[in-house]
Amino acid sequence: MRLINGLVAKTLPVVPKPLVRRVSSRYIAGESIDDALRVARALNQQGCMVTLDVLGEHVTKREEADQALRNYLQALETIAREKVDSNISIKLTQFGLKLDFDFCLGNVRRLVQRAIELGNFVRIDMEDTTCTADTLRFYEMLRQEFSNVGVVVQAYLRRTLADTRQLMQNGAPANFRLCKGIYIEPRELAFRDPELVRRNFTLVLGEMLRHNAYVGIATHDERLVWDALHLVDELQLPKSAYEFQMLLGVDEQLRDIILANGHRLRIYVPFGKHWYAYSVRRLKENPEIAGHVLKNMFRA
Ligand code: FDA
């Protein structure tokens, strides 16, 4: 089955778009802010916090970055007006990072400024390694000015432990999301062995928690959830010092177990017009989902 799943993942680009949409509808709220709102409300009712992601990345024109800013400003206003328990997650390449650093900084600064006025928070997702240094620099600059901004670091990167230590040296406690990392990176830069990625995740998480950083522990890997709970217990941390984070539609059983034990948990809810690129990335990443595509193909 693994071989077939892998094959399906590779051939995904030729799978009909409506089929990809059907399979990925579980992982994406929909195209509009109303779709996102509906899903966020339902999650809030189940006891989950939310982070909204307006899908899109690697814009090539300034107008596209401006549009991203408008979309996110609208998301912030909607969250405030509708009193939804949600913050936002952004990708810097959607705000023009690859076009012009200062242009991008100006856009994101406006967003973070509006977020702070509305009592909200902005998480900067981490993209591939061509963006790592700039993203961390960006975070350093913004946190000197704002308290409502956090960044993601990836446990599969060899540099992450050093980066994390560096970020925790200066100023107010840092605010991280820690995840394994989703992009395909060269071996010089990223651990390939899944067990090493896990060990690094736990090592980095321990460093963060011991240094009073706030951490969004973003994983569906139950072994890592166990490690995290062990660390939290050992360090006797209050539940307000961390939160678990999961993707929409993934391992809802684990989500319920974490919630039932009284921990805070946030669901990453992607929505927007650029759902196709996101779906293909998710489906390629996880051959098990690709298997669902196969099953659906036969059912279709
Ligand atoms: P692993 O991949 O081992 O998954 C554990 C189990 O969970 C699998 O066996 C599978 O059953 C299930 N599972 C995992 N992912 C699934 C999926 N997509 N669909 C269905 N089942 C799935 N990455 C990044 O590079 N930059 C970022 O900014 C972010 N942001 C982010 C936010 C949040 C809230 C989460 C949860 C994840 C991210 N990621 C990310 C993605 C992350 O790097 C990683 O690729 C995935 O979370 C999968 O890694 P796990 O730790 O879940 O382990």
Image (tube, helix red, strand yellow):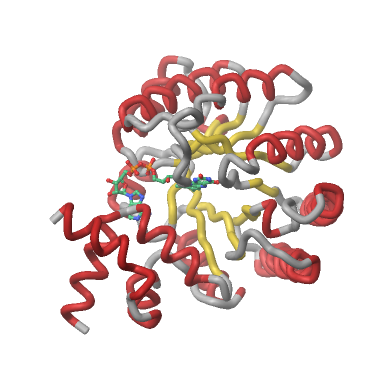
Residue at 62% across / 24% down in the picture?
163
Q: Is residue 152 visible?
A: yes
Corner quadrant of residue 136: top right
Q: Could you tell whether 295 is left or right of 59 in the image?
A: left
Corner quadrant of residue 176: top right
Q: Position of residue 22 (x, y in %)?
A: 35, 77
Q: Could you tell whether 112 is left or right of 191 in the image?
A: right
Q: Could you tell whether 45 is left or right of 106 in the image?
A: left
Q: Position of residue 212 (x, y in %)?
A: 62, 21
Residue at 82% across / 56% down in the picture?
107
Corner quadrant of residue 230: top left
Residue at 36% across / 58% down in the picture?
284
Q: Could you tell whether 194 is left or right of 59 in the image?
A: left
233 shown above or below 119:
above
Taking depth in this image into account, of 209 and 183 the one nearest to the observer is 183
Q: Position of residue 249 (x, y in %)?
A: 37, 60
Q: Position of residue 167 (x, y in %)?
A: 69, 24
Taking depth in this image into account, of 126 and 34 the one nearest to the observer is 126
Q: Is residue 77 visible?
A: no
Residue at 58% across / 40% down in the picture?
129
Taking depth in this image into account, of 35 and 83 the one nearest to the observer is 35
